[in-house]
Image: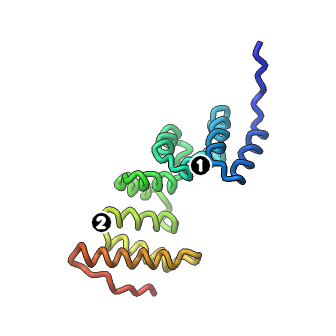
């Protein structure tokens, strides 16, 4: 007779918390997978696994995992779009971002990046300007650099000119 230890979800979450604190992403993937095997609807374990897959750059695995769990995936629209963006599936990323909240600055910034990669510089510029106007965090210099890059790309690759960078 095999001596199987009963699965203790509280203990598993304690281990998951420790792994998260240590940023041990492979452990997070493993532990959250065990939790989800026993309790498939656990949103916290699901989110931990998604983030850990992203942090370890396992984008294909992450997208596959999201597709296998469509109900829980509705809680991670931004993360799904980010994975699609990283896999250079720009059309899918843009479509996924349509489901995101319109006033979500993370989604708007990612949408600007998607549009930039697709060559729609004017739209990327508009989204990025909106993000800059509505954000108050430590990334303003990076966003201004991105805005300048969008304007430069627009002036190089199209007939219009966005060089007029008026942020206010």
Q: Residue at x 29, y 66 (%)?
A: 119
Q: Nearer the viewer, residue 131 or 31?
A: 31
Q: Earlier in the sequence, mark 1 or mark 2?
A: 1
Measured Cα–Cα span from mark 1 to mark 2:
30 Å
Other-residue count near label 2 (Cα within 10 Å), few / some / many at <14 / 14–19 / ≥20:
some
Verify CB contact (< 8 Å) between mark 1 and mark 2: no
Residue 119: which disc?
Answer: 2
Q: Residue at x 53, y 39 (%)?
A: 69
Depicted 34 relative to depicted 123: above or below: above
Q: Which image quadrant is residue 3 in?
A: top right
Residue 57: x and y in percent read: 51, 50
Q: Residue at x 71, y 45 (%)?
A: 16
Mark 1 or 2: in front is 1
Q: Which image quadrant is residue 94 in?
A: bottom left
Other-residue count near label 1 (Cα within 10 Å), few / some / many at <14 / 14–19 / ≥20:
many
Identify the image quadrant of the N terminus.
top right
Residue wearing tag 1: 52
Q: How many marks?
A: 2
């Amino acid at each position: 007779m095999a001596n199987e230890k009963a699965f203790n979800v509280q203990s598993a979450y304690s281990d998951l918390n420790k792994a998260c604190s240590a940023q041990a992403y492979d452990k997070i993937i493993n532990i959250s997978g065990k939790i989800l095997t026993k309790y498939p609807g656990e949103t916290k374990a699901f989110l931990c696994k998604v983030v850990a897959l992203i942090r370890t750059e396992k984008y294909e695995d992450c997208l596959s995992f999201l597709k296998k769990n469509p109900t829980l995936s509705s809680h991670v629209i931004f993360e799904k779009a980010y994975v699609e963006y990283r896999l250079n599936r720009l059309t899918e990323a843009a479509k996924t971002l349509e489901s995101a909240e319109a006033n979500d600055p993370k989604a708007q910034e990612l949408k600007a990046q998607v549009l930039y990669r697709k060559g729609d510089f004017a739209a990327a510029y508009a989204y990025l300007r909106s993000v800059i106007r509505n954000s108050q965090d430590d990334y303003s210099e990076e966003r201004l650099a991105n805005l300048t890059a969008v304007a430069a790309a627009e002036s190089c690759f199209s007939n219009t000119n966005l060089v007029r960078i008026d942020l206010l």
